[in-house]
Image: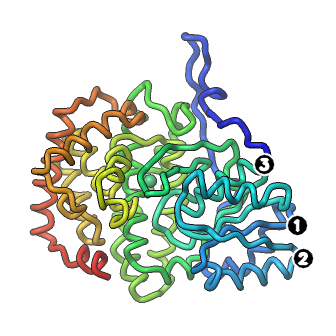
Amino acid sequence: MQTPEPYQPASIYVSNTADAVTPRVFIAPQRYIQGPGVIDRIGRYLTLVNVRRVAILISDRGRASEGPRILSSLESENMEAVLCRFGGETSLEEIELHQAELDGRVDCLMAVGGGKCVDAGKSIAFRLGIPVVIVPTLASNDAPCSAASVLYFPSGVYSHFESVPQSPALVVVDTGIVAAAPERYLAAGMGDAMATWYEAQACLKNPNGVNMLSARPTLASTAIGEICAHTLFEHGVAAASAVRDRNVDAPLEAVVEANTLLSGLGFESGGIAVAHGVAQTCTSLPGIPERYHHGEMVAIGTLVQLALEERRDETARVARFFAHVGLPVHLGQLSVDTSDTAAMDTLVEGTLEWPFTANMPFDVDASMLRRALLEVQEIGESVASEVGDTAYRRLQDG
Ligand SMILES: [Zn+2]
């Protein structure tokens, strides 16, 4: 078993001569397929990738629910499947376990599940040198379309980012499956997706801002971030209610695309900034990664970034939207007490150390961040009392 050298996009795109201009680079999966029932045609789509033996990385839950449909579709195309049980964490331990188990046995890996499963799938496929196919069962995050994984320690605390050289060969999103998942997942995906435009704006404005490939963002990626935010503002509340009714309608299709395709392309090619820095730092606060989804932490991160940019009206507008779809709007709703100095210090220091904080178009220091965190608490509390916290409570208690 040979593990490839870690892939560093900067070694490809960043020139080592000081006067060279950093190029604009846009990255995307080869194909994105979304619609109700598409999972039943996955074998047909896989013929585009030219595979015969497919490893399916899937949890016990997924194996019981989506497993039979996938297996029967592969069978009808005469493809063989090797089932691998996803244990639940995107840790190096889990990735290396599957690498050893699958080495030389398959010519493609299909990851079926939530953000952690699809990220693990990308990292395993990279180590095996085979294409990866992503079948998200939740629209809760922007992981499916990117060529990168977020790695965690087995405890759930954030470890590091891993880039892989190949984008997924296929991303297949069955909206019927996504609509059957609890509403809180769709809301979390909206929290993650809403950050996209604001983070892309920061990277574009900063002449030294770079995307996930250490390259300059394109106008295309920023435009994708913008339509992503507009789609959420317009259809987010209706999409949440469609999921409550388990109904696949036009608003739900629009929001699933925003959460999965637009958010994924937008963050990877457009770049990330403080919003994700606050979110990743939240995972190191005791009890938080177990209780909250990535997108819920990114929601708070987005508000902090907007407050840092002194965009008070936009902070309140986004917080109002979050309150309507049941996302947290202040640190208290993420179980962080702003009078807990140790927690506040961790948030400030972690965000300052986050490499993509340097994408902000101005220098960020500890006192600015502390002020922004407190301002989000104040704006969020006022929005929560204006809009009410019914949606937030329903999702948290549900
Ligand atoms: Zn994210």
Relative placement, left or right, of 130 versus 52 is: left
Q: Position of residue 148 (x, y in %)?
A: 58, 47
Q: Is residue 386 above or below residue 22?
A: below
Per the image, the residue denoted by label 2 is: 78
Count of marks placed on residues: 3
- For numbered disc 1, what is the local secondary structure? loop
Residue 396 placement (x, y as % from top left) = 29, 75
Residues at badges 1 and 2 in contact (C-beta under 8 Å)?
yes
The residue under the point 56% across, 23% down is 22
Secondary element at tag 2: loop
Q: Position of residue 31 (x, y in %)?
A: 69, 59
The residue carrying mark 1 is 52
Residue 348: quadrant of the picture: top left
The earlier-in-sequence mark between 1 and 3 is 1
Determine whether 214 is above or below 131 in the image.
Answer: above
**Disc with the residue nearer the chain's start (2 vs 3):** 2
Q: Does the closest atom of ligand 1 sit within 8 Å of the Cβ of label 3?
A: no
